[in-house]
Image (spheres, grey):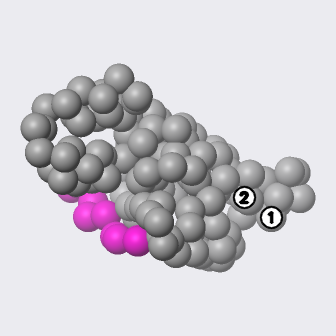
């Protein structure tokens, strides 16, 4: 699995960013991230995951979208750090063929985030933050 780090600066408050996140990530599974005692303290840190299934719509594309969102207060602005997680097409194919049983293949594919969907999740958040600021 690979990861891509993206940073966005905003004048919105942490509470305003949370409102944007609630709207963009509706339907996603959200969990709090525990702080690493050696890392810089953050105001807010979550992991968001959303799986598109036959019965569940996702605005982020096919497969599972998965991203960390970490907000750090910098005084006059907030720094939003994103980490998009996922596998590319080649990795998905390799994972699929690592299992002989068709049900195991499907289970393995569904449990791996898709990088394209994860990056779409992050870009949707950045777009919504920019729109809330009046710059998007």
Q: Which residues are magenta?
A: 29-37
Residue 88 rendering spot, x and y as whole percentages: 40, 29
| Residue sitting nearer the eye, 28 or 134 | 28
| Location of mark 1 (residue) | 132
The residue at the far top in this view is 90
* Residues at marks 2 and 1, CA–CA distance in whole angstroms: 5 Å
- Rendered residue at 80%/64% (across/down): 132
Residue 106 rendering spot, x and y as whole percentages: 26, 50
Residue 121 rendering spot, x and y as whole percentages: 57, 52
Residue 85 highlighted magenta (yes or no): no
Please identify the quarter of the rendering in which residue 47 is found: bottom left
Q: Secondary structure at mark 2?
A: helix
- For label 1, the crowd category at 10 Å Cα-Cα, with few meaning under 14, some 14 to 19 and many 20 or more, is some
Is residue 43 something that shows in the picture? no
Please identify the quarter of the rendering in which residue 35 is found: bottom left
- Rendered residue at 44%/64% (across/down): 53
Q: How many marks?
A: 2
| Residue sitting nearer the eye, 56 or 71 | 56
Question: From the viewer's perspective, is residue 98 above or below residue 114?
Answer: above
Image marks 2 and 1: residues in contact by CB distance under 8 Å: yes
Residue 31 highlighted magenta (yes or no): yes
- Rendered residue at 57%/50% (across/down): 61
Is residue 58 something that shows in the picture? yes
The residue at the far right in this view is 134
| Location of mark 2 (residue) | 129
- For label 2, the crowd category at 10 Å Cα-Cα, with few meaning under 14, some 14 to 19 and many 20 or more, is many
| Residue sitting nearer the eye, 35 or 123 | 123
Residue 124 rendering spot, x and y as whole percentages: 66, 53
């Amino acid at each position: 699995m690979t990861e891509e780090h993206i940073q966005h600066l905003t004048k919105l408050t942490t509470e305003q960013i949370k409102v944007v996140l609630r709207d963009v990530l509706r339907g996603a599974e959200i969990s709090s991230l525990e702080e690493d005692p050696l890392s810089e303290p953050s105001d807010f840190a979550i992991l968001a995951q959303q799986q598109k299934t036959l019965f569940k719509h996702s605005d982020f594309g096919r497969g599972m979208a998965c991203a960390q969102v970490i907000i750090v207060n910098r005084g006059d602005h907030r720094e939003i750090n994103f980490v998009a997680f996922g596998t590319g097409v080649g990795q998905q194919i390799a994972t699929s063929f690592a299992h002989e049983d068709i049900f195991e293949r499907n289970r393995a594919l569904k449990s791996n985030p898709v990088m394209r969907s994860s990056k779409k999740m992050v870009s949707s958040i950045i777009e919504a933050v920019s729109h809330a600021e009046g710059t998007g």
